Amino acid sequence: MKLFKQAEVYSPQYLGTKDVLIAGTKILKIADELTSFYRDDIEVIDCQGKILCPGFVDSLVHITGGGGEGGYSTRTPEMSIEEAIVGGVTTLVGVLGTDSITRSLENLLAKSYALEEQGLNVYCHTGSYHLPAVNITGSVTKDIMLIDKFIGVGEVAIADHRGSQLTVNELAKVASEARVGGMLANKSGIVSIHVGDSEEGVSLIQQVAEETDIPVTQFYPTHMNRSAELLEQGISLAKAGGYIDFTTSTNEQILASGEVSAAHAMAIALDKGVPVSQITMSSDGNASLPLFDDAGKLVDLQVGKVASLHESVVEAILEHNVSIAEAIASVTQSPADILNLKKGRIVEGVDADLNVLRADSFAVEDVYSKGAELMKAGKVVITSHF
Ligand code: ZN
């Protein structure tokens, strides 16, 4: 048992100063003071002046690596578990990307089992950028129904030269396959959508929602902060009930070319009246971030970082006046609810996935996943083999 003493608790809603008791893997009790629980064998963690919030849920990470668009030497490396822990991420969703030839779903599953063995909560999507979707058991529906880790499909690429140039009917079909799999297995069956650079933006999603019985909430479009124009489209989609996800991995050059930072995009969307329950941020960790020279020649390749998720939470609060509760919700409760995961909240009875943050800088100090300590005082405390 561990007792988090006198923490400023964001559940992600602000609950005030509370004691939070965890037993084994679960949150047992939350109260103003839990003095009657004092026993010698309870580890007491003094959280005075600290924030206690749910462990972050990162809805899009290329855990087995991504990229490769500049040739084999530009394939990005796998995510290491430390990269997630230092950013306070305790739950993540692994995906393939452009390359579903040398990257496989079997490898994705193996990596997710490995991360889970080491203490994280890991889910995956079947499929990749392309349709027909790669799968393991014969169909997207079967994969979602029969393979525990698969909760949806994607990221399916639209508005992108690397995508399968889908028709409305083709997107509706894969969405229906994922939806049925999700319904029958009590999972989200979400269709993660990679939205590329093309002007058409999310119009394909809007057409499916208008012309078929598939609701707009079946889709989870990401990179919606890619440009001011796409952000505008995303806000319209959200006003029609849809979800929008903003990508936190970026660099100066991408921002200079018109990308809106995820934190800023969130502030704009909130300001325009989109509820935080429809807004999320994800890292797109381990995707490639190409750097080009003025002639458009690839000169360097950086790798997206999972820890950028936490950096964007801090940026949203400190630079864009987003409330602490909403900034935290966008990386906890909102993605967990969209993905139908029992995660992302501090309430009695749920998994003890917790972050202790400094109240002034919001730096991540301690990280707990299913009650186990993964980081203490800013230092990762698990041992990994590599
Ligand atoms: Zn993408």
Image (cartoon, helix red, strand yellow):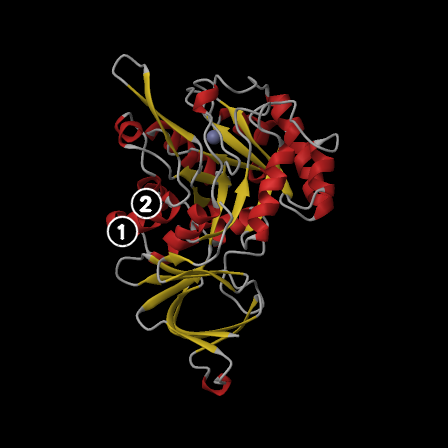
| 185 up-or-down from 198: above or below | below
Residue 101 visible in the displayed image: yes
Residue under label 1, please give it.
Answer: 321
Q: Residue at x 41, y 38 (%)?
A: 246
Q: Earlier in the sequence, mark 2 or mark 1?
A: 2
Amino acid under disc 2 = Ala
Circle 1 — which element? loop
Q: Is residue 247 above or below residue 344?
A: above
Q: CA distance from mark 2 to mark 1?
A: 7 Å
Q: Residue at point 49% right, 45% down?
A: 386
Badges 2 and 1: C-beta atoms under 8 Å apart? Answer: yes
Q: Residue 140 in the image: x percent, y percent? A: 69, 33
Q: Which residue is mark 2?
A: 267
To which quarter of the image does residue 12 belong? Answer: bottom left
Q: Nearer the viewer, residue 289 or 133?
A: 289
User: In the image shown, does 364 or 155 lie closer to the viewer?
Assistant: 364
